[in-house]
Amino acid sequence: MTGTRTALNDPHTVGQWVTDRARRHPHKAAIIFDGREVTYGELDDASNRLACRLLGEGLVPGDRVGSLSQNQPEQVALLFACAKTGLIFFPMNWRLTNVELAGQLGLIAPSRWFVSRAQRSRVDDVLTSVVGPPLDLEASYEDEQTGREFELPDVSADSALAIIATSGTTGGPKGVLLTHANFFWTNLSLDLVVPITQDDVVLQVLPQFHIGGWNVQPMLAWWKGATVVLESTFEPERVLALIAEHHVTTMAGVPTNYQMIGQHPDFDLADLSSLRSAVVGGAAMPYTLVEQWHARGVALFQGYGLTEAAPNVFCLDDADALSHPCSVGRPYPYVDVALAEIETSELLEGSVQGELLVRGPSLFASYWSDLAATAAAMDDGWLRTGDVAARDADGYYRIVGRVKEMFVTGGENVYPVEIENVIASFDAVLSAAVVSVPDPTWGESGVAFVECAHGENVDLVALTEHCRARLAHFKVPVRFEVVAELPRNTVGKIDKVALRTRAFSRVGAKP
């Protein structure tokens, strides 16, 4: 292995995770990727070499290191290299345009940035004019010539580890700064609810430019010594084949992933005998989809999180999935939540509805270079999520909607998520999205976009009656529109901006 002195770091730091595993099980597969295995010894060694290279080029703790790459072992090694050196890892969203990426590069200002060979062809003057030419990720990973040895600097739990750009559903993207402590506590809490052991095989399809691509199973797997089957893209047929080939025991994804897998013609006969559980996040899981996966013997752990919480906040255990439809469950250990009155910020008790507040050791440090946005998001140690949640008498939570998505019809407040959950419970409906449009009589009214289950048709008259039986009359959408597929962003969340534009065009208005 590369000769480096391992610093006496705070036990809550991440760099030690792969080193500890390499000492105990150097030949155990840490990653399986595209037919090749990377052992814990090889991963630790590669991250040491990358650490030495970065230190040798003059980088110091606190400097940023960008990476434009799809999921692959080289990027994992780069994250651990940053963890060992106190550098800040910035995984870039390769699905963005170069103009969007250039804006992020200008904000984060990485001292070095790497690009994978698969992304190399897109590098142009727009990107290089901001921070200069990138380094080749694979060549740097494979380079055995590290120059002289370097002593790794001391790293503390409060040291920054990563900057994750948010998806931007509430405005322009922000850089969420996460520390080693944030990674430590969110993975510890995950392990106490949805545990992973060294015998597990984890299938990882979530993109690594989102926090879920790291802290919803992969980082915990490498901490515990499990094997991660890492995929650069998501293909339902390949997922089914990989589960059978590698005896995958657990995986994570957004509802769209499970929907596409469930719609594949091989799903009913595929060998899922090894798949013990699946974690679901990013959006609500339709009731019919839960039933479909339960029928194949897969336990589902649904939840809610956000980048600023690194990301895990709530989890609904599999045993509660059918008895508490549309719920996100209860808080993870070490996560405090509260509900606040939206106008006054007064904390509310009991079975109430209000803005969801979150605090705890997994909560982010700040928005990068944006003190005003950080101050606006925080309230006496609590993060104001902007999400409206309801709490029942048993302490289960349900996400009702966004504060800014609420609309007022005839003087009544309406939250789209409540309506969407009712629509999604109707036979033949897979997903739904509700947006508001101007109404000459009531001020605003709701319009519903409905995506049907594969091969199904929906009776809109019956669907309307279904809603009227379960919702106050003012909540029932004035129009239902069936679409082949709801538009979604890169994390699988429904693109309400696109739907709002479409709905406004139907009434001859501008959003």
Image: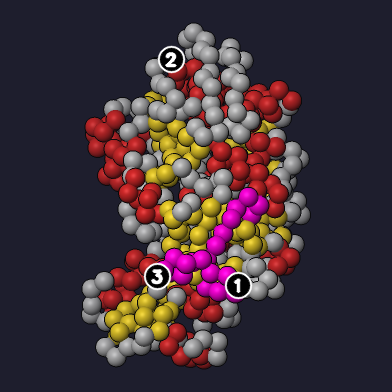
Q: Amino acid at mark 2?
A: Gly
Secondary element at tag 1: loop
Q: Which residue is mark 2?
A: 56
- Of 365 and 300, the residue lying toward us: 365
> Of the residues tagged 3 and 2, which is closer to the observer?
3
Q: For the residue marked with disc 3, what is the amino acid? A: Glu
Task: Work out whether 479 lies above or below 181.
Answer: below
Residue type at numbered disc 1: Gly
Is 12 on the left-hand or right-hand side of 58? right
Q: Position of residue 215 (x, y in %)?
A: 57, 45
Marks 1 and 3, how far apart at CA? 18 Å
Q: Which residues are magenta?
A: 332-353
Q: Residues within 10 Å of mark 1 (few under 14, many from 20)?
A: few
Instruction: Examine the structure image and report whether residue 207 is included in the region drawn in magenta.
Output: no
Prevailing SS of the magenta stretch: loop
Q: Which residue is mark 3?
A: 343
Q: Which residue is mark 1?
A: 350
